[in-house]
Amino acid sequence: MTLPLDHIVIAVQDLERTIADFSALGFQVLRGGEHPGRSTHNALVVFGDGAYFELIAWRSPAPEERWWQQLQRHGEGIVDFALLPSETGAVVAAAQARGLDYETPYEGGRLRLDGARLHWRNARARSQDLPFLCGDLTPRALRVPEGESRIHPNGAAGVARLHVAVHDLRSSLARWRALLGEGADISEARRSGDGSAYRASLKLGSTELVLAAPAQGVATGALGHWLATRGEGPYVIELAVRDAAAVRPLDESATHGARIALVQPAEAGETAAA
């Protein structure tokens, strides 16, 4: 089953400030609009591979929403990610048949600044090491702009890797196999160079997703901090650039808590996730 990365959600306090900061980092930022029935508004950073960042903020408190809860509890940063199904209901039904517990699909939408109304069908997993699904009911090009809007002055061309912190690698891999089904391209678990974690990777379209779990229950660095404070979920993003001179980690104060590094596609990825 083909389930490419659709987008990564970064929750922020002030959308206008975030737009300015990401623009200063060399990203082209597009204003997305508002979500009817919610107090959220967003902006997008779309890459050449079709994946994008959703920068999301709230105009008023939303204590019933998990992303808002995470923002209040832990501060700004990465809160979730989504895959792109051809049809959300069919993917959920297949995953449930393989024993995976996904919630019933529900519809959402966005009102763009130009008045266009977008609609999609989401479904959420019950464990945070898995993504939610975001399948379009209106053309995806309305939700995710194409063309020159995907070209960034800093050279970022796509999401090379997304690192996800998990407590138990074996259990998480079993859930991912149930989601992706037969033919999933999943690597064998390996120990990190410093011995502090076990990692396995799988392909989501052109993006490598890296699952990382502490070895013998102990994790250090970004992985250990993330699991201790936020629990399971996406915690490091590596964006592909072609120019070696552009390779660098981005200032987390400017990325509003999101740990993002510009890398060349062939790099191993352990430094960014340490």
Image (cartoon, rainbow, N blue to C red):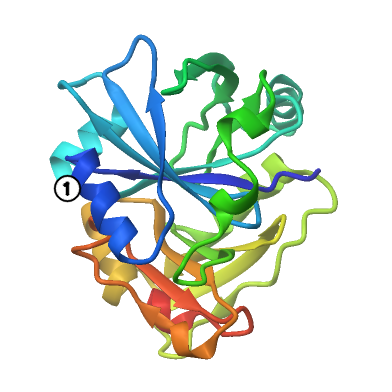
Q: Residue at x 63, y 84 (%)?
A: 266
**From this viewpoint, is residue 98 visible?**
yes
Q: Is residue 263 above or below residue 186?
A: below
For image coordinates 29% across by 63% down, the residue present is 24
Residue 194: where, in percent of width, then height?
Answer: 41, 90
Query: Is residue 102 shown left or right of residue 31?
Result: right
Looking at this view, name the residue that lies furthest to the right: 183
Q: Position of residue 157 (x, y in %)?
A: 58, 65
Quadrant of the image occupied by residue 91? top right
Residue on which the image places disc 1 = 75
Number of dots carrying numbers:
1
Say which residue appears at 47% left-offset and 15% top-offset: 115
Quarter of the C terminus within the rendering: bottom left
Image height check: is 30 above or below 262? Answer: above
Q: Quadrant of the N terminus?
A: top right
On the image, the x and y values in percent for residue 197 come to 43, 76
Q: Is residue 34 above or below residue 168?
A: above
- Asked if residue 220 can be seen in this view, the reply is no
Q: At label 1, which amino acid type do we have?
A: Gly
**Front-lying residue, 82 or 212:** 82
Secondary structure, mark 1, is: loop
At a point 60% along the width and 80% down the height, the residue shown is 242
